[in-house]
Image (cartoon, coloured by chain):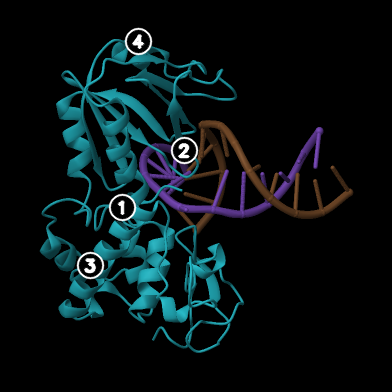
Chain colours: A cyan, B purple, C brown
Amino acid sequence: MPEGHTIHRLARRHARLIGGQHVSADSPQGRFEDGARLLDGRALSATDAWGKHLFHRYDDLWLHVHLGLYGTFRDGTLPAPAPRGALRLRLVGGGHWLELRGPTACEVLTDDERGRILARLGPDPLRRRPDVEAFVARVLRSRAPIATLLMDQSVVAGVGNVYRAEVLFRHRLDPFRPGRDHDAAVLHALWDDLAVLLRAGVRAGRIVTTLLKDRERPSGRPRREDAHYVYRRTDLPCRICGTPVQDGEIAARRLYWCPVCQV
DNA sequence: GCAAAATGTCAAG
DNA sequence: TTGACCTTTTGCA
């Protein structure tokens, strides 16, 4: 379930579980054998996340992981389970094991190579002092639909399909309106809300964007299907106006919105 | 048993 | 804009 919140959560978790420890690394699946050999025996000195990119620091090397659409990490306390399925990377240290399966990227990088990845990324609302003005300026310069811009990792890093749909709904914004047709104040509010939602996601370990009063069951933990306003709610009534939620395709990704609230 | 879907990205045309 | 790729889970035969 990898949008930015997942990656930042993993960075913190990995630091807690194996930070400062010498690790043993292997690649039962074989597709990361060389990389695992490079890391094996080194100590994890730091972890870091920028958008959907996760980094582990081992001496002068970086492990770079991008989960893509299907990648997952699991972890636990020793003993580690027997390898099953396509296990790209296993790390063991500090009494814990980590398993990585299905990532788009799993590679060992130098400082320079890592720098080149970061240079492609826009500000990340989850980082300490993100360049909000850079985000606003990029959007105001672009004719592309706001929905497209929010998924562009060079505009804002860490937002994926769920946060995109939900934040646009929360601000009642038409997904198809060009970036440059927005007020700067609206874009600042959008950014602030993304920061709030992503932080909540890091804390909870899942994405919940609905206000209590807008859930079917206003009290208690939200049920899975109450967590969103529009994402994957095609044809269900909009929580605000009751109009069926609409979906469509934009840049090969599904987009969900309320045609009445978002104008 | 197989197809489809899933919170993503890149490169080719 | 399309297809390829990474892997697991779910749903339907």
Q: CA distance from mark 1 to mark 4?
A: 30 Å
Q: Position of residue A34 (x, y in %)?
A: 37, 12
Using a 10 Å C-alpha cutoff, classify the residue at mark 1 as few (fewer than 14 neighbours), some (14 to 19) or many (20 or more): many
Q: CA distance from mark 3 to mark 1?
A: 12 Å
**Amino acid found under the numbered disc labelled 2:** Gly
Q: Is residue A81 above or below residue A190?
A: above
Q: CA distance from mark 2 to mark 1?
A: 15 Å
Q: Chain of mark 3?
A: A
The residue carrying mark 3 is: A191
**Amino acid found under the numbered disc labelled 1:** Gly
Q: Is residue A176 above or below residue A223?
A: below
Q: CA distance from mark 2 to mark 3?
A: 27 Å
Using a 10 Å C-alpha cutoff, classify the residue at mark 4 as few (fewer than 14 neighbours), some (14 to 19) or many (20 or more): some
What label sits on residue A16 in the rendered view?
Answer: none
Q: Contact, CB < 8 Å: mark 3 with mark 1?
A: no
Closer to the chain start, of discs 3 and 1, is 1
